[in-house]
Image: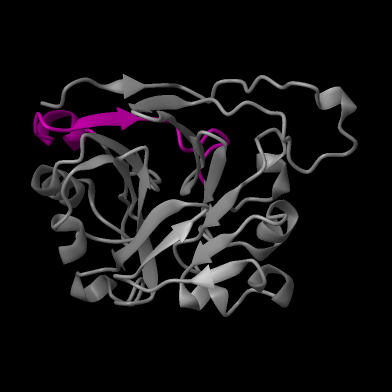
Amino acid sequence: MFKRRHVIAGMAALPLVGMAGVSNPVLAQEAALEGDKVPTDDGDIVIHPVDHASLLLGFGNEVIYVDPVGGAALYERLPAPTAILITHGHGDHFDLPTLEAIAGSAPILTSQEVFDKLPEALKANASAIANGEETSLNGIAVRAIAAHNITEDRMQYHPVGVGNGYLLTLGGKVVYVAGDTEPTEDMLGLTAVEVAFLPMNLPYTMTPEQAVEAINVFKPRIVYPYHYGDSDLSVLETEVGPDSEVRLRNWYPNGQG
């Protein structure tokens, strides 16, 4: 049984500072990012779900957008991005109109597949990274790892070598955003992961049972199921080992679909 179950019904309101003085903002630079806080020696990591596979990670002055999609309105009351990560080119992870509306001058790190689809204005601030490569994003160490299907009849959804998962080191703590994947060798070989975001919905990614098996192998300290659609997550309540804390959050505040 996992350490404790955290469930919230919806998203907390975001307090705003000085919004009245902002003329038609696309994003609120003054907005305070709220969410779960994971302590590090250099301050808290703030975790803010947006919808499905989209999330924000706050750390110090950094606000990292991960797979922002859904239109600018979803982000207009959130802090502007200081960096953007995109895992792969599917529409629930990469949406060009959203990106053009919110990106500003933030650097974008993504896969070659997505980089090739960017217009020149966004390419100027973007770079591509392949599985196994390492780089720095605003001084934050990032490593791309394999994100793909392993089950034969699902391979067409996420072939080998196309998409990325990302490992970010924030304040000495490793955060793993899996992207769309089943349990790859890269995933199962991970160690010392503080926070992991794992997808689980069929036929595209893992089953909850596969996720449990993976969690019990690489033992992230905190696990957020995301990208779960209408999956039954109850197996996570009984089968995840004591080394990992599962945090269930509402990734569908506007309903699924």
Please give the name of the residue rendered at 80% of the width and 22% of the height, measured from the top-left corner.
18
Please give the name of the residue rendered at 9% of the width and 48% of the height, measured from the top-left corner.
217
* Residue 138 vertical placement versus 246 (above, below): below
Please give the name of the residue rendered at 34% of the width and 61% of the height, measured from the top-left corner.
143
Q: Position of residue 10 (x, y in %)?
A: 50, 24
Q: Is residue 187 left or right of residue 170?
A: left
Q: Is residue 178 left or right of residue 74?
A: left
* Residue 51 vertical placement versus 91 (above, below): above
Residue 36 visible: yes
* Magenta-colored segment: predominant secondary structure: loop
Q: Position of residue 158 (x, y in %)?
A: 35, 71
Q: Is residue 149 left or right of residue 165?
A: left
Write the start and end of the magenta stretch as one range. Answer: 234-257
* Residue 61 vertical placement versus 152 (above, below): above
Decide whether residue 152 is among the magenta residues. Answer: no
Give 215 or 150, whichever is nearer the viewer. 215
Q: Quadrant of residue 108?
A: bottom right
* Residue 168 vertical placement versus 60 (above, below): below
Q: Position of residue 247 (x, y in %)?
A: 31, 29
Residue 204 visible: no
Give 254 or 158, whichever is nearer the viewer. 158
Please give the name of the residue rendered at 46% of the width and 67% of the height, measured from the top-left corner.
88
Number of numbered callouts drawn? 0
Q: Position of residue 58 (x, y in %)?
A: 50, 36
Q: Is residue 190 left or right of residue 199?
A: left
Quadrant of image for the N terminus: top left
- The colour scheme of the drawn protein is one colour
